[in-house]
Image: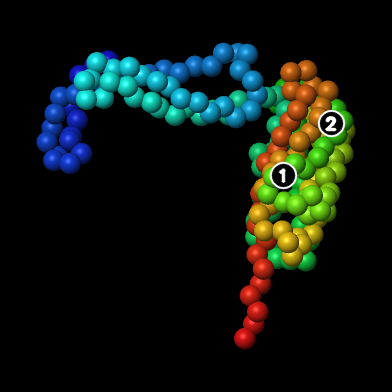
Amino acid sequence: TKIVEREHPKTGEIMMVGESTIEVSMSEAARIGRLDGQIRLETTEPSNPVLTLRAMANVAGDINSIPGRISLSALTPGQEFEKTVKVVSGKGTPFKINKARFVTTTMSDEDRDTIEITYKPLPEDSEEVGYELTVKGKATDTMRIIQGSVVMLTDAPGQRIVRTQVSGVVRVQSASR
C-alpha cells in the first residue's frame, strides 16, 4: 500500500489516496478448465469495510484445440456447415482421443444428434502431435442457438477430458414481399 495522487472522478480535484496492489497466484495443482470465484477484502475504510472482487481464470492443460473454439457463425435452416480444428499436445506428448461427443443444453436431442463429430490423427509429417477434429452438420428449422462443447475422452494423464466450445446461431429468413 502506498499514498498516491489521484483525480476525483466527479470533481476533478487532485487528492492523496491510499492505493494497494493485490497479487493472486494459483497452485500448480489447479484443475484444468475455467475457474470463477471471489476475493473478499477487509479494509480499514469505515465507509467500505468489505470489498468483494470477482476473479476468473482459464487453466490450460497440455492438450488444447487450435483455434480454441469452433464458431459456426450465422446459419440459415438447410445450410450445411463443417469446421475443423486441431487438437494438439503443447509438449508434443502422444495421446489418444478415445471418444468425442457434442454436448449441449440449448438444443433438442434430435437437433444435437444431427451434428457429426469426427477425428483423425494429424499426418505423420506434421510438426504437431494430435488430431484433426471436425464438426459437421446441417442447420434445421428448429435450431436457434447452437451452443455447447465437443467433449473428448483421452488417455492423457491428468487431462482425461478435453473440451472445445462450439457456438453458432440459426436465423430463419423472413418471407419476401
Which of disc 2 and disc 1 is earlier in sequence?
A: 2
Helix, strand or loop under label 2: strand
Residue at the location (22% across, 25% down)? Answer: 47
Taking 51 as reference, is 70 left or right? right
Which quarter shows the C terminus? bottom right
Query: In the rendered image of this protein, does residue 65 appear above or below residue 77?
Result: above
Helix, strand or loop under label 1: strand
Amino acid type, mark 1: Thr
Residue at the location (38% across, 26% down)? Answer: 52
Residue at the location (49% across, 16% down)? Answer: 25
Residue most extreme to the bottom:
177
Residue at the location (71% across, 41% down)? Answer: 149
Q: Residues within 10 Å of mark 2 (few under 14, many from 20)?
A: many
Query: In the rendered image of this protein, does residue 68 appear above or below residue 153?
Result: below
Taking 99 as reference, is 151 left or right? left
Q: Residues within 10 Å of mark 1 (few under 14, many from 20)?
A: some
Q: Which disc is residue 104 wearing?
A: 1
Residue under label 2: 97
Query: In the rendered image of this protein, does residue 112 appear above or below residue 5?
Result: below
Q: Is residue 90 visible?
A: yes
| Foreground pick, 106 / 134 | 106
For residue 50, which quarter of the picture?
top left
Marks 1 and 2, how far apart in space? 20 Å
Q: Residue 53 in the image: state x and y as whole percent.
A: 40, 27
Q: Residue 17 in the image: state x and y as whole percent.
A: 19, 24
